[in-house]
Image (cartoon, helix red, strand yellow):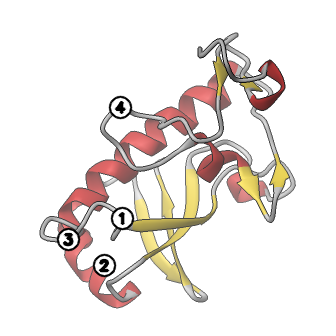
Amino acid sequence: MSKHISKDCFYNLPSGAMVHPCRLIHRDGTLMWKHALLHHNQLTLPETEAQEQHIIKTAQRLEELNSWVSQDLEPWEGFRIHVWFNLDIPELSDGISAYFKHSVCSNTNVLKTLNAHIQEHETLEIKGTSLFFRRC
């Protein structure tokens, strides 16, 4: 933690970790804590360590899937999260699901590319104008 950033800028997670919204969830990744916890500028913090761990594991899996779609693209040309963790939305209250789009590829192309890489306990489908991913 930097000594030059106010502690008020950090999110306190159930594990006791304090993370800045712009901190990457996984080193060398592209997804930040703000992608998981902010929706329409409304902050939703996990209430349990299990939710926190689900967010971390989902981030890891989304990073893996993004690498299959974005191999020849620039780092900023990848998944754009619309909503991920939100206690007010039942399907998003555990941290294992997310709605997203790809910044360059169409939903149909992303779905075609990733279908071979989706594991049997996972779901990837087009819902409305976004892709919906669920880990379990």
Label 2 and label 1: CA atoms lie apart by 16 Å
Position of 23 relative to 103 (above/below): above
Amino acid, disc 2: Val
Label 2 and label 4: CA atoms lie apart by 24 Å
Q: Where residue 48 appears, x then y in whole percent?
A: 74, 23
Label 3 and label 4: CA atoms lie apart by 19 Å
Label 3 and label 2: CA atoms lie apart by 13 Å
Reading the image, the residue beneath label 4 is 27
Is 3 displayed left or right of 135 in the figure?
right
Position of 97 relative to 100 (above/below): above
Depth check, front residue: 26 or 111: 26
Q: Quadrant of the N terminus?
A: top right
Reading the image, the residue beneath label 1 is 76
Reading the image, the residue beneath label 3 is 73
Is 76 displayed left or right of 82 in the figure?
left
Dot 1: element? loop
Dot 2: element? helix
Snapshot quadrant of residue 95? top right
Amino acid, disc 1: Trp
Reading the image, the residue beneath label 2 is 110
- Labelled pair 3, 2 in contact (Cβ < 8 Å): no
N-terminal label among 3 and 4: 4
